[in-house]
Image: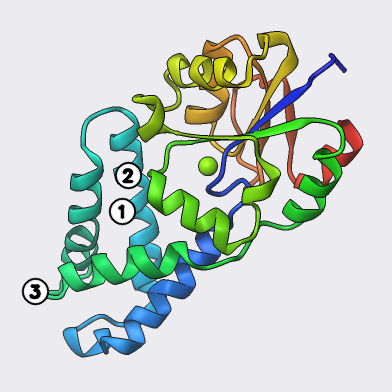
Amino acid sequence: MPSYRHLFFDLDHTLWDFERCSGETLEELFQEHQLHTLGMECVADFVVTFRNVNRQLWHQYGAGQITQQQLRESRFILVLNQLGVVQTDITAKLTEQYLLRCSSKSYLLPYAREVLDYLKEKYILHIITNGFDEVQSIKMASSGITGYFRHIVTSQKAGCHKPNRLIFDYARQLARALPEHCLMIGDSLEADIAGARNAGIDHVFYNYERLSHNETPTYEIQCLSELMKML
Ligand SMILES: [Mg+2]
């Protein structure tokens, strides 16, 4: 194992349990706004459709095809359209309430806190996230993990997104770290793994969904707890 000194973590789906926080928020909104009265069959459809639409929009955002504003504004419009809901004057309210509530949820992925407690004694920890400044800082504060990290680099702050190597260079310069002393840990082959490779940084693919793929990441894990054996 090379002599890493700086560990760079992705946030969403790597430490902060996006699916659980998002799912719970959507369930609350479904009940409060009585969305079944608009023709939506069940809350599960709402959650699954949101997940698919959100992934697609984040993919487009990562590729520079849409802006943050467009991502936020079109998300619930697309979800409701796909579910056959005609009345859409509720989308602005859903957008606003979703953003506020979801980021204030505190669920972390299994072993996230144990792993951070273990790693903080041996390494300098940082975040590199494609999320937005204000939202990501609320998520980290809500889940009580802000204090583990020296630098929190968002795409908004760096002026570019993963997988662009410039965001990794920016984070590395902020940390005053050589590439060989850095390790990126993330759940996205597209953003984290391809990005770190572009930037000449070793990387750990956190493949919690056990996806089959043809990539050859430096390391691959299925549970965060494996980091305590590796590092
Ligand atoms: Mg992620």
- Whether residue 78 sits left or right of residue 155 in the image: it is left
Of the two numbered discs 3 and 1 on the same chain, state the one appearing first in sequence. Answer: 1
Q: Where in the figure is residue 204, as x and y percent of width and height?
A: 69, 29
Residue at the (33%, 68%) spot, across then down: 98
Mark 2 surroundings within 10 Å by alpha-carbon count, few (fewer than 14), some (14 through 19), many (20 or more): some
Amino acid type indicated by mark 3: Asp
Residue at the (49%, 18%) spot, across then down: 170
Q: Where in the figure is residue 40, as x and y percent of width and height?
A: 25, 80
The residue that label 2 is drawn on is 56
Q: Nearer the viewer, mark 3 or mark 1?
A: 3
The answer as to whether callout 2 falls within 8 Å of ligand 1 is no
Local secondary structure at mark 3: loop
The residue that label 3 is drawn on is 89
Residue at the (61%, 45%) spot, across then down: 14
Residue at the (23%, 63%) spot, across then down: 76
Name the quarter where the N terminus is drawn: top right
Q: CA distance from mark 2 to mark 3?
A: 23 Å
Amino acid type indicated by mark 1: Val
Amino acid type indicated by mark 2: Gln
Q: Is residue 131 above or below residue 22?
A: above
Mark 3 surroundings within 10 Å by alpha-carbon count, few (fewer than 14), some (14 through 19), many (20 or more): few
Please identify the quarter of the rendering in which residue 230 is found: top right
Q: CA distance from mark 3 to mark 1?
A: 19 Å
Q: Is residue 89 above or below residue 82?
A: below
User: Which colouring convention does the figure follow?
Assistant: rainbow
The residue that label 1 is drawn on is 53
